[in-house]
Protein backbone atom coordinates (compact mmCIF):
# COMPACT_ATOMS: atom_id res chain seq x y z
CA UNK A 1 0.00 0.00 0.00
CA UNK A 2 1.10 3.53 -0.63
CA UNK A 3 1.21 5.99 2.25
CA UNK A 4 -1.82 7.71 0.77
CA UNK A 5 -3.78 4.44 0.75
CA UNK A 6 -2.73 3.83 4.36
CA UNK A 7 -3.97 7.23 5.45
CA UNK A 8 -7.16 6.86 3.44
CA UNK A 9 -7.90 3.53 5.15
CA UNK A 10 -7.21 4.98 8.61
CA UNK A 11 -9.34 8.00 7.92
CA UNK A 12 -12.26 5.95 6.59
CA UNK A 13 -12.09 3.75 9.66
CA UNK A 14 -12.17 6.75 12.02
CA UNK A 15 -14.99 8.42 10.11
CA UNK A 16 -16.98 5.19 10.31
CA UNK A 17 -16.35 4.93 14.05
CA UNK A 18 -17.48 8.51 14.58
CA UNK A 19 -20.60 7.97 12.47
CA UNK A 20 -21.47 4.79 14.40
CA UNK A 21 -20.91 6.53 17.75
CA UNK A 22 -23.13 9.42 16.64
CA UNK A 23 -25.84 7.00 15.55
CA UNK A 24 -25.70 5.26 18.94
CA UNK A 25 -25.93 8.61 20.70
CA UNK A 26 -28.76 9.91 18.51
CA UNK A 27 -26.54 12.68 17.17
CA UNK A 28 -25.84 13.85 13.63
CA UNK A 29 -22.42 12.79 12.36
CA UNK A 30 -21.77 16.34 11.20
CA UNK A 31 -21.87 17.53 14.82
CA UNK A 32 -18.43 15.99 15.34
CA UNK A 33 -15.24 17.36 13.79
CA UNK A 34 -12.31 14.98 13.46
CA UNK A 35 -9.06 16.79 14.24
CA UNK A 36 -6.27 14.63 12.83
CA UNK A 37 -3.27 14.82 15.16
CA UNK A 38 -0.18 14.83 12.96
CA UNK A 39 2.51 15.26 15.63
CA UNK A 40 5.71 13.31 14.87
CA UNK A 41 4.61 12.81 11.27
CA UNK A 42 6.01 14.83 8.37
CA UNK A 43 4.43 17.70 6.47
CA UNK A 44 4.15 15.32 3.48
CA UNK A 45 1.54 13.35 5.47
CA UNK A 46 -0.36 16.56 6.24
CA UNK A 47 -0.39 17.28 2.52
CA UNK A 48 -1.76 13.81 1.71
CA UNK A 49 -4.42 14.21 4.41
CA UNK A 50 -5.48 17.57 2.97
CA UNK A 51 -5.89 15.82 -0.38
CA UNK A 52 -8.17 13.31 1.34
CA UNK A 53 -10.44 16.09 2.60
CA UNK A 54 -8.96 16.71 6.04
CA UNK A 55 -9.27 20.33 7.14
CA UNK A 56 -8.54 20.21 10.87
CA UNK A 57 -5.10 19.12 12.04
CA UNK A 58 -3.65 19.06 15.55
CA UNK A 59 -0.12 19.50 16.84
CA UNK A 60 1.28 19.51 20.37
CA UNK A 61 4.85 20.81 20.10
CA UNK A 62 5.48 24.41 19.16
CA UNK A 63 8.58 24.16 16.97
CA UNK A 64 7.34 21.18 15.03
CA UNK A 65 3.92 22.77 14.57
CA UNK A 66 5.33 26.11 13.46
CA UNK A 67 7.52 24.45 10.83
CA UNK A 68 4.73 22.23 9.52
CA UNK A 69 2.25 25.11 9.33
CA UNK A 70 4.82 27.06 7.31
CA UNK A 71 5.50 24.07 5.03
CA UNK A 72 1.76 23.69 4.41
CA UNK A 73 0.87 27.38 4.17
CA UNK A 74 -0.56 26.89 0.67
CA UNK A 75 -3.17 24.42 1.97
CA UNK A 76 -6.55 25.34 3.40
CA UNK A 77 -6.08 23.88 6.87
CA UNK A 78 -7.14 24.76 10.39
CA UNK A 79 -4.31 24.23 12.87
CA UNK A 80 -5.30 23.23 16.39
CA UNK A 81 -2.64 23.56 19.04
CA UNK A 82 -3.34 20.87 21.65
CA UNK A 83 -0.10 20.67 23.63
CA UNK A 84 1.35 22.13 26.77
CA UNK A 85 2.06 25.79 26.32
CA UNK A 86 4.77 27.94 27.87
CA UNK A 87 3.79 31.57 28.27
CA UNK A 88 6.93 32.72 26.45
CA UNK A 89 5.86 30.67 23.37
CA UNK A 90 2.17 31.54 23.44
CA UNK A 91 2.40 34.60 21.19
CA UNK A 92 4.33 32.64 18.56
CA UNK A 93 1.75 29.83 18.65
CA UNK A 94 -1.07 32.34 18.17
CA UNK A 95 0.58 33.52 14.97
CA UNK A 96 0.01 30.23 13.11
CA UNK A 97 -2.60 28.30 15.11
CA UNK A 98 -6.26 28.84 14.28
CA UNK A 99 -7.39 27.36 17.57
CA UNK A 100 -5.47 26.89 20.81
CA UNK A 101 -7.25 24.12 22.72
CA UNK A 102 -4.89 23.82 25.66
CA UNK A 103 -5.36 27.10 27.53
CA UNK A 104 -5.12 26.17 31.20
CA UNK A 105 -4.08 29.34 33.01
CA UNK A 106 -4.74 33.06 32.88
CA UNK A 107 -1.10 33.87 32.29
CA UNK A 108 -1.42 32.61 28.70
CA UNK A 109 -4.23 34.97 27.72
CA UNK A 110 -2.32 38.22 27.22
CA UNK A 111 0.48 36.68 25.11
CA UNK A 112 -2.04 34.73 23.02
CA UNK A 113 -3.99 37.92 22.37
CA UNK A 114 -0.79 39.76 21.50
CA UNK A 115 0.24 37.02 19.06
CA UNK A 116 -3.22 37.08 17.50
CA UNK A 117 -3.12 40.80 16.75
CA UNK A 118 -2.23 40.38 13.07
CA UNK A 119 -5.05 37.93 12.41
CA UNK A 120 -8.20 38.78 10.49
CA UNK A 121 -10.35 36.81 12.91
CA UNK A 122 -10.00 36.52 16.68
CA UNK A 123 -8.10 33.43 17.79
CA UNK A 124 -10.33 30.53 18.86
CA UNK A 125 -9.45 29.13 22.27
CA UNK A 126 -10.66 26.23 24.35
CA UNK A 127 -9.93 25.79 28.03
CA UNK A 128 -8.29 22.52 28.93
CA UNK A 129 -9.92 21.00 32.01
CA UNK A 130 -8.04 18.58 34.22
CA UNK A 131 -9.90 15.31 34.78
CA UNK A 132 -7.24 13.96 37.11
CA UNK A 133 -8.44 13.08 40.59
CA UNK A 134 -7.51 15.75 43.16
CA UNK A 135 -3.97 15.23 44.39
CA UNK A 136 -2.93 13.18 41.36
CA UNK A 137 0.41 13.84 39.79
CA UNK A 138 -0.68 16.83 37.80
CA UNK A 139 -0.92 16.57 34.06
CA UNK A 140 -2.16 19.55 32.06
CA UNK A 141 -5.45 21.31 32.61
CA UNK A 142 -7.17 23.81 34.82
CA UNK A 143 -8.68 22.55 38.06
CA UNK A 144 -12.49 22.39 37.56
CA UNK A 145 -12.90 24.48 40.75
CA UNK A 146 -11.32 27.52 39.10
CA UNK A 147 -12.54 26.92 35.55
CA UNK A 148 -15.22 29.62 35.66
CA UNK A 149 -12.76 32.25 36.80
CA UNK A 150 -10.42 31.40 33.91
CA UNK A 151 -13.40 31.32 31.51
CA UNK A 152 -14.51 34.81 32.55
CA UNK A 153 -11.03 36.15 31.93
CA UNK A 154 -10.72 34.40 28.56
CA UNK A 155 -14.15 35.61 27.44
CA UNK A 156 -13.23 39.20 28.24
CA UNK A 157 -9.86 39.14 26.45
CA UNK A 158 -9.96 41.11 23.20
CA UNK A 159 -8.63 39.14 20.25
CA UNK A 160 -9.71 35.76 21.64
CA UNK A 161 -12.96 33.88 21.12
CA UNK A 162 -13.79 31.40 23.84
CA UNK A 163 -15.12 28.34 22.00
CA UNK A 164 -15.43 25.72 24.70
CA UNK A 165 -13.60 23.06 26.65
CA UNK A 166 -10.98 20.43 25.97
CA UNK A 167 -9.93 17.45 28.07
CA UNK A 168 -7.89 14.27 28.02
CA UNK A 169 -9.10 11.21 29.95
CA UNK A 170 -6.58 10.27 32.66
CA UNK A 171 -4.29 7.38 31.76
CA UNK A 172 -5.50 4.08 33.10
CA UNK A 173 -8.90 5.41 34.17
CA UNK A 174 -12.26 4.48 32.66
CA UNK A 175 -12.77 7.13 29.96
CA UNK A 176 -16.55 6.87 30.26
CA UNK A 177 -16.39 7.84 33.91
CA UNK A 178 -13.94 10.67 33.17
CA UNK A 179 -16.08 12.01 30.32
CA UNK A 180 -19.22 11.78 32.52
CA UNK A 181 -17.47 14.14 34.91
CA UNK A 182 -16.45 16.35 32.01
CA UNK A 183 -20.06 16.54 30.78
CA UNK A 184 -21.14 17.69 34.25
CA UNK A 185 -18.42 20.35 34.35
CA UNK A 186 -19.48 21.49 30.90
CA UNK A 187 -23.13 21.84 31.95
CA UNK A 188 -22.11 24.38 34.60
CA UNK A 189 -19.75 26.14 32.21
CA UNK A 190 -22.46 26.48 29.52
CA UNK A 191 -24.78 28.27 31.93
CA UNK A 192 -22.33 31.17 31.93
CA UNK A 193 -20.95 30.75 28.40
CA UNK A 194 -23.85 29.42 26.32
CA UNK A 195 -22.10 30.11 23.01
CA UNK A 196 -18.93 28.25 23.95
CA UNK A 197 -20.28 24.90 22.81
CA UNK A 198 -17.15 23.12 21.64
CA UNK A 199 -16.16 20.02 23.57
CA UNK A 200 -12.86 18.54 22.42
CA UNK A 201 -12.59 15.09 23.96
CA UNK A 202 -11.75 11.62 22.77
CA UNK A 203 -8.69 10.22 21.01
CA UNK A 204 -7.98 7.05 19.01
CA UNK A 205 -8.72 4.77 21.96
CA UNK A 206 -11.75 6.45 23.48
CA UNK A 207 -13.53 8.52 20.86
CA UNK A 208 -16.80 6.54 21.19
CA UNK A 209 -16.98 7.29 24.92
CA UNK A 210 -16.44 10.99 24.20
CA UNK A 211 -19.00 11.21 21.39
CA UNK A 212 -21.55 9.53 23.67
CA UNK A 213 -21.00 12.37 26.15
CA UNK A 214 -21.30 15.27 23.77
CA UNK A 215 -17.86 15.73 22.20
CA UNK A 216 -17.95 18.08 19.21
CA UNK A 217 -14.27 17.54 18.36
CA UNK A 218 -12.28 14.32 18.60
CA UNK A 219 -8.48 14.44 18.34
CA UNK A 220 -7.29 11.36 16.53
CA UNK A 221 -3.69 10.55 15.76
CA UNK A 222 -2.55 6.93 15.70
CA UNK A 223 -5.83 5.52 14.36
CA UNK A 224 -5.23 7.53 11.18
CA UNK A 225 -1.45 7.80 10.90
CA UNK A 226 -0.22 4.66 12.67
CA UNK A 227 1.81 4.43 15.84
CA UNK A 228 4.22 7.21 16.70
CA UNK A 229 7.77 6.77 17.88
CA UNK A 230 7.50 6.85 21.69
CA UNK A 231 8.08 10.20 23.34
CA UNK A 232 11.66 10.43 24.61
C1 LIG B 1 -1.34 12.93 20.75
C2 LIG B 1 -2.62 13.51 21.25
C3 LIG B 1 -3.85 13.03 20.77
C4 LIG B 1 -3.98 11.90 19.76
O1 LIG B 1 -3.73 10.68 20.40
P1 LIG B 1 -4.00 9.28 19.65
O2 LIG B 1 -4.12 8.32 20.77
O3 LIG B 1 -2.82 9.02 18.78
O4 LIG B 1 -5.24 9.41 18.89
C5 LIG B 1 -5.00 13.64 21.24
N1 LIG B 1 -4.96 14.64 22.14
C6 LIG B 1 -3.80 15.12 22.62
C7 LIG B 1 -3.83 16.24 23.61
C8 LIG B 1 -2.58 14.57 22.19
O5 LIG B 1 -1.43 15.06 22.68
Image (cartoon, rainbow, N blue to C red):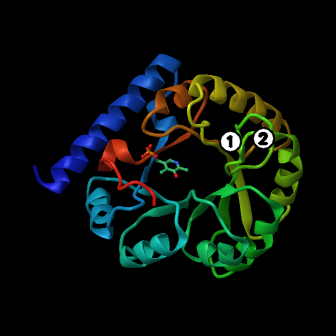
Q: Residue at x 32, y 46 (%)?
A: 224
Which residue corresponds to mark 1?
Answer: 197
Q: In this rendering, is residue 143 above or below 41?
A: above
Q: Residue furthest bottom?
A: 118
Q: CA distance from mark 2 to mark 1?
A: 7 Å
Q: Position of residue 142 (x, y in %)?
A: 77, 49
Q: Residue at x 10, y 49 (%)?
A: 1
Q: Position of residue 77 (x, y in %)?
A: 43, 64
Q: In this rendering, is residue 157 above or below 116?
A: above
Q: Position of residue 56 (x, y in %)?
A: 45, 55
Tell me the SS state at disc 1.
loop
Q: Nearer the viewer, residue 35 or 227?
A: 227
Few, some or many residues within 10 Å of mark 2 (<14, 14–19, 20+): few
Can you tell which quarter of the image residue 220 is in?
top left
Q: Are marks 2 and 1 in contact (CB under 8 Å)?
A: yes
Q: Position of residue 213 (x, y in %)?
A: 61, 26
Tell me the SS state at disc 2.
loop
> In the visual, does 58 lie left or right of 52?
right
Q: In this rendering, is residue 157 above or below 186?
A: below
Q: Residue at x 74, y 39 (%)?
A: 136
> In the visual, does 151 lie left or right of 14?
right
Please count the marks in the image.
2
Which quadrant, please, contains the C terminus? Answer: bottom left
Which residue corresponds to mark 2?
Answer: 194
Q: In this rendering, is residue 142 above or below 121?
A: above
Q: Residue at x 36, y 77 (%)?
A: 71
Mark identifier at residue 89: none
Q: Nearer the viewer, residue 214 or 141?
A: 141
Amino acid sequence: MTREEDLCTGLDDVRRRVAAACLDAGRDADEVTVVVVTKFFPASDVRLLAGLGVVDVGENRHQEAQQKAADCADLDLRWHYIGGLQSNKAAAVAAYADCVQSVDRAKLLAPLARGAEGREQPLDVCLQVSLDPPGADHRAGVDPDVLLDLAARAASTDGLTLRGLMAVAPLGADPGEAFDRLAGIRDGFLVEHPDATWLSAGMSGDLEAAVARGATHVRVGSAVLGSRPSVP
